[in-house]
Amino acid sequence: MFIDTHCHLHDPKLPDTDAVVNAYLRDGVDTVINMGCCAATSIGGKLLAEKYPSVYFATGCHPSDVETFDDTEFNKIAELTSHPKCVAVGEIGLDYYWKPFDKDKQEKAFVKQIELAKESKLPICIHNRDATGDMLKILKDHKDKLVYGGVMHCYAGSVETAAELLKLGLYISFAGPLTFKNARSLLEVAAFVPCDRCLTETDSPFLAPHPLRGTVNEPKNVAITTAFLANLKGIELTEFAAILKNNAKRLFYKMK
Ligand SMILES: [Zn+2]
């Protein structure tokens, strides 16, 4: 019934993939989308998707991994887009938190992969950390390339920024931080974003939701964040999970 739209199953913090997959299937998560951070992890996602029916994957270079983003790396990432279980280009974007960073290189990689998404008819999964101004500018400048839409993953911004993203046709994805005790401004965003534009995710193995905060996160915990959001929206959980599943299928249209 649940879908985790953003996780990293290949992360070394989740060494036993069979156990992780069995745990989420048992807890009602029937679909997960594994994100790529570079060519190697994107290929890793492909192998997981070929092994587990419940796993789909995205291919892309994370802004914190652009140091190694050259033509060879790009071609490997691009090649994966035609795979039947590759449902998005991601995660891509800007990250000015982890230092040092190269703004110019990040922007070039971001734009190149936005173009890749258009050419390969896929939506994008966007990562943004401490770069909201530049990120919005790039998205607006390349609005014509966002034909297949996209999602702002692990949303942590303001209501105003969320409004801009919705105007661009993008979805807003909520992760564990929505459930944190200090998440007051995110609660306003969650109330503001219409149900048909919401998604949930775990970003496993990071950002475990309350009350598991600080532990290794797993896709099964998307149920916690989804229940939290359903409660905020005043919608019964099964019904709300079905709405989110429909949203995901609309955006990640290659999913069966
Ligand atoms: Zn991620």
Image (cartoon, grey):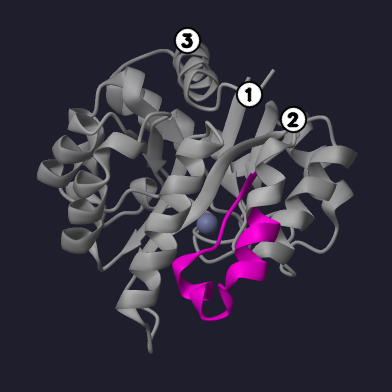
- Name the residue carrying label 1: 254
The stretch drawn in magenta includes residue 150: no
* Position of residue 64 measured from the top left corner of the image (x, y, whole percent): 47, 74
SS assignment at label 3: helix
Q: Amino acid at mark 3?
A: Glu
Q: Amino acid at mark 2?
A: Pro
Q: On the rendered structure, is 148 left or right of 55?
A: left
Tell me the tag on residue 239: 3
Image: 231 above or below 188: above
The answer to which of marks 2 and 1 sits earlier in the sequence is 2
* Position of residue 43 measured from the top left corner of the image (x, y, whole percent): 76, 56
What is the span of residues highlighted in magenta in the rendered image? 58-77
In which quarter of the view is residue 88 placed? top right
The answer to which of marks 1 and 3 sits earlier in the sequence is 3
- Name the residue carrying label 2: 84
Q: Residue at x 38, y 46 (%)?
A: 179
Q: Residue at x 47, y 31 (%)?
A: 226
